[in-house]
Amino acid sequence: MTQALMGFEKVLYIGTAGSTAATQVLDIVNIKVTETVQYGNTISRGDGTSVPRVSKRAVSLEKVVTFNSLNVPDNTNIATIMAAATAETPASRLISMKVVDVASGVTEFDADVDISIDRDAQLSAEQDLAFVATVDRSERDPVV
C-alpha cells in the first residue's frame, strides 16, 4: 500500500530575485500552494428561441503560495522574507521562492514573488507570521 504524503515533507526555499531559490527556510509551520484558473465567457445568445447556455474558456492560470512561520527573531531567512514584505520599493519587495515536495521530488512552485505579511500575536499563543507570495515576472518568468 502506498503511504500518504505528510505535511512536513514539503519545504520552502528562498533566494535572490532573478535566480532559482536554494536556501531552505526553517521555522515554517504551514505551506499551501493554490492554483486558480480564470475564465473568459464564450457564451452566445443563439437564435433567440432558447435560453443561452453558459460556456467559458480558460484564459489564465494563477499560483499563489501562502505560508506561516513562527516569529523567531534570530532566523535570518524569516528576517529576509519580512524585509521584502515591508519594503517600499517594488524591486526590494521581490525574492525568489521554490516549494518542493521532498518525498515525491516534485517542484510545485518556482518563481520570483512579491510578499505580503500578516502578523498575529494572540495572548494565549506564539506569535504567528502569515505570508502570501504572489508571482512577479519583473526578473524572470515563473518556472512552475
Image (spheres, rainbow, N blue to C red):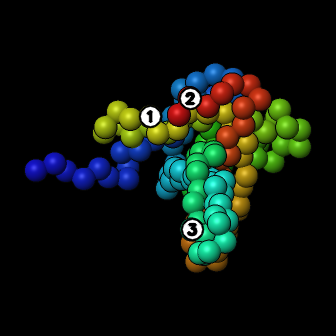
Q: Is residue 41 left or right of residue 94?
A: left
Q: Secondary structure at mark 3?
A: loop
Residue 69, visible in the rendered structure: no
**Rendered position, 118 above or below 15:** below
Q: Secondary structure at mark 2?
A: loop
Q: Is residue 135 left or right of residue 50?
A: right
**Residue position marked by numbered label 1 in the rendering:** 107
Residue 23, visible in the rendered structure: yes
**Rendered position, 20 above or below 126:** above
**Residue position marked by numbered label 2 in the rendering:** 143
Q: CA distance from mark 1 to mark 2?
A: 10 Å
Q: CA distance from mark 3 to mark 2?
A: 36 Å
**Residue position marked by numbered label 3 in the rendering:** 53
| Disc nearest the viewer among 1 and 3 | 3
Q: Which circle's residue, 1 or 3, is located before the other in the chain?
A: 3
Q: CA distance from mark 1 to mark 3?
A: 38 Å
Q: Position of residue 86 (x, y in %)?
A: 81, 48
The crowd level at tag 3 (other Cα within 10 Å; few <14, some 14-19, many 20+) is few
Callouts 1 and 3 close, C-beta under 8 Å: no
- Which residue is the extreme one toward the top? 19
